[in-house]
Amino acid sequence: MQTQEIVDAIFDVKTNGELSELFTAIRDARKALALKSRNTWHIGQEVNVVERNKTTSGTIKKVNQTRCVVKLPKGNYNVPMSMLEAT
C-alpha cells in the first residue's frame, strides 16, 4: 500500500474511536522503529537531523533509550532517533 493510499484511507475514517486506534498504532510503530534503530547509533557518529524542511549535520554525544544528544551548530539537542540519518 502506498503512502497516499494510506492517507486517503485515514480521511475515510468515520469515528473518533477509529482515529484514536490509528494514532495509537502510529505511536507504537514509531517507538518500535526507534528501538530497532537504537543499536545502529554510537557516540561520535556523524549524522543528519532531518526536519520538515531542512537537514542539519551534527555529531552524536550520547545515546539514550529513544533519543540521542546531538551536537549541532547552535548547541546540544535531544533528538528522536527517528529524525536521524547516518552520513
Image (spheres, helix red, strand yellow):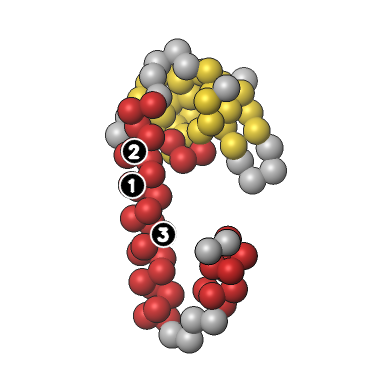
Please tell me whether residue 32 is drawn above or below residue 78 in the rendered image.
below
Going by the numbered disc 3, the residue's amino acid type is: Ile
Taking the view exactly as shown, the residue that stands out farthest to the right is 53
Taking the view exactly as shown, the residue that stands out farthest to the top is 44
Judge the density around disc 1: few (<14), some (14-19), many (≥20) Cα neighbours within 10 Å: few
- Residue 17, which numbered label? none
Q: Are marks 1 and 2 in contact (CB under 8 Å)?
A: yes
Q: Mark 3 or 1 closer to N-term?
A: 3
> Which residue lies at the image location 43% right of the left edge and 75% below the top edge?
19
In the rendered structure, the answer to whether residue 65 lies left or right of residue 23 reads left
Going by the numbered disc 2, the residue's amino acid type is: Lys
- Of labels 2 and 3, the one closer to you: 2
Judge the density around disc 3: few (<14), some (14-19), many (≥20) Cα neighbours within 10 Å: few
How far separated are the C-alphas under marks 1 and 2?
6 Å
- Residue 36, which numbered label? 2
How far separated are the C-alphas under marks 2 and 3?
15 Å
